[in-house]
């Protein structure tokens, strides 16, 4: 019998050899340490267990495949990581792709290859070097949703298209997100109300109401519900002065006026107040000369359901590049530079970016509120999800304190919370009005 071989057709042999040598025949996944060749039988003396995994997928339709990298660049050493079969399947599984991002895999690859280089230089035995384990609190880029609207309302739409629907007559601060699907308008407002914001655009007598949990469990309605949540985000970010980049599904800062850089005040990790540039024109270090592009802080926000009843909002910091502060530059011209900048955001730097966005979106408060009126509201806690882990830790230069973990209510935020949380009585009124249909969501 022949020995078992792993064949990588599209990856040049020189790139395979470079990756294998730099990886030291060891799986690059943290704390795995599996040797990627094993002793076999007399007939099959060597078994190869390693797999060359693509960081940005080889195909645009694959895991992490949305990237400006060319087909050739996707099959080069820089975009490959050597893993065992188990961890290769893990990083590409549907439930883990959001966790194992391009940035995280690049950092994993770099850390592993540095460890291999240090060990080979000292000629130490890999299995003899056991790291000292420490207990740490690890923060994520995920915010928990603490309250969802109880109901979704639908009614036949009298308007031809979404652009013809212009909600009106709402109280100050009330948000009116809506979608049109299959000829019906769907919203969080009671569409039977003759004084409601959509009264002029729907057949109020045909209004139907659904409990939100009912929609979460239905694959099609689930997507509609996420679309409503995204429209709510559009309302929030618009009020905060952010622009929507529809092509890349992210929100970004724009300059207040042409040619003028912009900054905002926020609460950083360990201070009460600081100023951060959100639109700026980078300068060359050697000469101080302005470069021919502008950078804009941007963020990708995504709602997802982690179990039958718990929603979360993920915050993914991004960068937008323009030629003059307004005109976008094609991704193929800037993709590699932006990916390189993001790949250098390790631990504390990335946490600082997430902190900026949760502080800005929450206006330095303990929650982000979306008031829809009549007791209907969406509330997101600005406390980052966290957990305790026992692990080797991180380098001292990245192991820095994080003091502003939680925000404390003041009179203003407490009053705002009261207005968002007054849904018990309103829920009973709505039950009576529509005959008790739907499911109550706590």
Image (tube, helix red, strand yellow):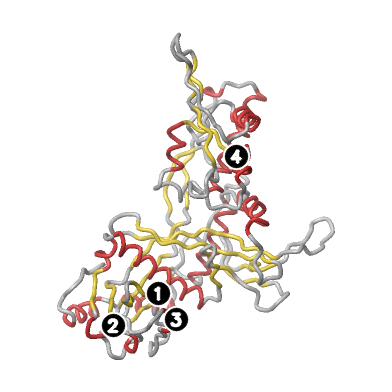
Q: Residue at x 61, y 61 (%)?
A: 319
* Along the line of sight, the residue nearer the viewer: 385 or 325: 325
Mark 3: few/some/many CA within 10 Å (<14, 14-19, 20+): few
Q: Identify the element where label 2 is drawn.
A: loop
Q: What's the CA distance linking mark 1 and mark 4?
A: 45 Å
| Residue 67 position within the rendered picture, expressed as x and y whole percent measured from the top left | 57, 52
Rendered image quadrant of residue 150: bottom left
Q: Which residue is mark 3?
A: 163
Q: What's the CA distance linking mark 3 and mark 4?
A: 44 Å
Q: Are marks 2 and 3 in contact (CB under 8 Å)?
A: no
Give the answer, above or below, for where 3 lies relative to 326. above
| Residue 234 position within the rendered picture, expressed as x and y whole percent measured from the top left | 47, 73
Q: What's the CA distance linking mark 1 and mark 2?
A: 18 Å
Q: Earlier in the sequence, mark 2 or mark 4?
A: 4
Q: Is residue 37 shown left or right of residue 430?
A: right
- Looking at the rendered image, the disc whose residue lies closer to the viewer, 1 or 2, is 2
Q: Earlier in the sequence, mark 1 or mark 4?
A: 4
Q: Earlier in the sequence, mark 1 or mark 2?
A: 2
Q: Residue at x 60, y 70 (%)?
A: 253
Q: Residue furthest right?
A: 287
Q: Which residue is mark 1?
A: 370
Q: What's the CA distance linking mark 2 and mark 3?
A: 18 Å
Q: Are marks 1 and 3 in contact (CB under 8 Å)?
A: no
- Looking at the rendered image, the disc whose residue lies closer to the viewer, 1 or 4, is 4
| Residue 188 position within the rendered picture, expressed as x and y whole percent measured from the top left | 32, 76
């Amino acid at each position: 019998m022949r020995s078992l071989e792993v064949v990588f057709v599209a990856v040049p042999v020189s790139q395979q050899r470079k990756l294998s040598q730099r990886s030291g025949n060891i799986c690059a996944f943290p704390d795995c340490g599996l040797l990627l060749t094993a002793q076999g039988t007399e007939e099959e003396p060597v078994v190869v267990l390693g797999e060359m995994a693509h960081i940005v997928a080889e195909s645009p339709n694959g895991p992490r495949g949305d990237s400006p990298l060319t087909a050739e660049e996707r099959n080069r050493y820089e975009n490959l990581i050597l893993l065992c079969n188990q961890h290769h399947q893990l990083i590409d599984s549907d439930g883990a792709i959001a966790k194992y991002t391009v940035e995280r895999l690049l950092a994993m690859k770099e850390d592993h290859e540095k460890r291999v280089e240090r060990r080979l230089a000292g000629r130490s035995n890999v299995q003899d070097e056991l790291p000292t384990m420490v207990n740490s609190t690890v923060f994520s880029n995920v915010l928990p949703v603490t309250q969802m609207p109880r109901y979704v309302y639908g009614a036949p739409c009298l308007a031809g298209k979404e652009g013809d629907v212009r909600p009106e007559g709402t109280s100050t601060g009330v948000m009116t997100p809506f979608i049109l699907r299959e000829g019906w308008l769907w919203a969080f407002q009671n569409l039977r109300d003759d004084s409601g914001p959509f009264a002029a655009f729907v057949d109020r007598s045909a209004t139907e109401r659904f409990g939100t949990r009912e929609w979460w469990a239905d694959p099609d309605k689930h997507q509609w519900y996420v679309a409503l949540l995204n429209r709510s985000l559009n309302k929030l970010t618009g009020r905060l002065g952010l622009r929507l980049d529809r092509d890349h599904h992210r929100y970004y800062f724009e300059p207040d006026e042409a040619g003028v850089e912009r900054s905002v005040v926020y609460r950083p990790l360990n201070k009460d107040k600081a100023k951060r540039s959100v639109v700026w024109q980078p300068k060359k270090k050697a000469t101080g000369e302005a470069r021919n592009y502008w950078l804009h802080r941007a963020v990708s926000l995504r709602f997802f359901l982690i179990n039958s009843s718990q929603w979360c909002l993920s915050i993914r910091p991004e960068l937008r590049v323009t030629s003059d502060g307004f005109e976008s530059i094609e991704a193929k011209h800037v993709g590699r530079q932006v990916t390189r900048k993001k790949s250098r955001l390790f631990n504390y730097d990335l946490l600082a970016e997430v902190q900026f966005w949760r502080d800005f979106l929450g206006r330095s408060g303990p929650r982000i509120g979306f008031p829809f009126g009549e007791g209907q509201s969406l509330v997101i806690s600005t406390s980052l999800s966290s957990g305790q882990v026992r692990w080797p830790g991180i380098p001292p230069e990245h192991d820095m304190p994080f003091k502003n973990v939680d925000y404390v209510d003041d009179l203003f935020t407490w009053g705002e919370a009261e207005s968002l949380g007054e849904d018990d009585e309103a829920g009973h009124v709505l039950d009576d009005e529509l005959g008790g249909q739907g499911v109550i969501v706590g």
